[in-house]
Image: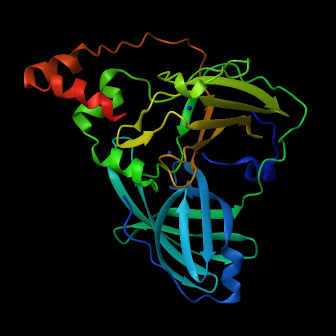
């Protein structure tokens, strides 16, 4: 797959949002570097749109690591308050890009420039992420009905840290057989239910899971369980039957609808995966019908002599 908030509250509410080279491990750091550790609200400004995500900088026994939306990225240099790293991301056509972020910490805020191929592509900022202050608050629903037009789907982080089980599944991914979009399978979870989760929900294996929601303050929190083991995007990335997806939906002060996603799946991912999307009010012109016929997918496999291979491959998920 909301919140009433003021300017500073956006950073507080933002969570989650979802093929890296080896990490550069820095064994030495000054006392100032410690100010970089922790989670940050990352904003990538390309000039036309701002994409949000979670930046995490961690230091353990002298080794520094950097993550974006739960996936590791390359730490290129770390010198006192200055940091340089690059991260892998895809565009709307699943084309892979690597962008370098260079910046420094001034006070409690990081900022700098983005570049690709030696040319500047935008700017970035990061401010401390302080959790969810609405957690456990009495319900205070807000009106989020209507039509919303997508503005940003987040950082588009491409690769994540998979467990050995998850990596083994991902290595067998076949873009012809396994891309869910080719079979007209929706790319996300789309409904909620006010009841408790059924018993043995992990065995439900529903294509888009079983979702229930509740209000925490003016934040709509939706939790989805019981998803069918499959891949969660067109590039692969396996999801197990025990995966839990949490969405937090809220309105910002400009009237935009934000959704922060967190996917927890310890069977396949070493760390939680985050995504952050937001939408603006769209024209209430209704919805046109959407037609997707999976016959073309199965027929093409039959003509290529791969249909039996496809049915056999379903045991992978």
| Quarter where residue 105 is shown | bottom right
**For this rendering, which residue is in front, 257 or 301?**
301
Left or right: residue 12 compared with residue 246: right
- Location of residue 54 with respect to 32 vertically, above or below: above
Q: Is residue 140 left or right of residue 278?
A: right
Image x and y of residue 215, in percent: 80, 29
Quarter of the image with the N terminus is top right
* Quarter of the figure with residue 218: top right
Q: In the orientation shown, which residue stands out farthest toward the front? A: 200
What residue occupies the far right of the structure in this picture?
A: 138
Q: Quadrant of the C terminus?
A: top left
Q: Image point 81% across, 26% down: which residue?
A: 142
Colouring scheme applied when the structure was drawn = rainbow
Looking at the picture, how far across and down is residue 37, in whole percent? 67, 72
Q: Is residue 79 visible?
A: yes
Q: Quadrant of residue 190?
A: top right
* 199 lies above or below 175: above
Picture coordinates of residue 166 (x, y %)? 41, 48
Residue displayed at 22% across by 33% down:
176
Residue 79, percent from left and from top:
57, 86
Q: Which residue is nearer to you in this view: 127 or 7?
A: 127
Count of marks placed on residues: 0
Work out whether residue 90 can be spotted.
no
Q: State the residue at coordinates (29%, 49%).
A: 171
Depicted 204 relative to depicted 136: above or below:
above
Judged left or right of residue 83, residue 134 is right
- Front residue of 184/148: it is 184
């Amino acid at each position: 797959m909301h919140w009433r908030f003021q300017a500073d509250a956006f950073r507080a509410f933002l969570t989650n949002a979802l093929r890296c080279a080896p990490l550069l491990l820095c064994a030495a750091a000054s006392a100032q570097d410690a100010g970089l550790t922790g989670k940050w609200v990352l904003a990538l400004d390309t000039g036309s749109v701002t994409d949000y995500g979670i930046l995490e900088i961690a230091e353990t026994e002298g080794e520094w690591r950097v993550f974006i939306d739960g996936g590791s990225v390359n730490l290129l240099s770390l010198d006192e308050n200055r940091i340089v790293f690059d991260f892998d991301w895809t565009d709307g056509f699943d084309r892979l890009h690597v962008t370098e972020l260079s910046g420094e910490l001034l006070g409690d805020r990081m900022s700098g420039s983005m570049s690709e191929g030696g040319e500047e592509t935008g700017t970035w900022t990061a401010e401390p992420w302080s959790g969810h202050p609405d957690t456990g608050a009495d319900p205070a629903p807000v009106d989020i009905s209507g039509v919303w037009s997508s503005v940003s789907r987040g950082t588009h982080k491409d690769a994540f840290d998979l467990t050995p089980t998850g990596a083994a599944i991902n290595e067998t991914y076949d873009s012809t057989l396994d891309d869910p979009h080719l079979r007209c399978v929706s790319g996300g979870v789309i409904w909620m239910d006010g009841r408790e989760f059924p018993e043995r929900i992990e065995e439900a294996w529903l294509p888009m899971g079983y979702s229930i929601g509740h209000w925490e303050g003016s934040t709509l929190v939706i939790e989805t369980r019981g998803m069918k083991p499959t891949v969660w995007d067109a590039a692969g990335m396996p999801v197990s039957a025990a995966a839990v997806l949490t969405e937090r939906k809220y309105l910002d002060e400009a009237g935009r609808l934000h959704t922060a996603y967190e996917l927890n799946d310890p069977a396949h991912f070493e760390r939680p995966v985050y995504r952050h999307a937001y939408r603006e009010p769209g024209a209430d012109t209704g919805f046109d019908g959407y037609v997707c016929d999976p016959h073309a997918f199965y027929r093409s496999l039959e003509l290529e002599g791969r249909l039996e291979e496809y049915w056999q491959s379903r045991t992978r998920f």
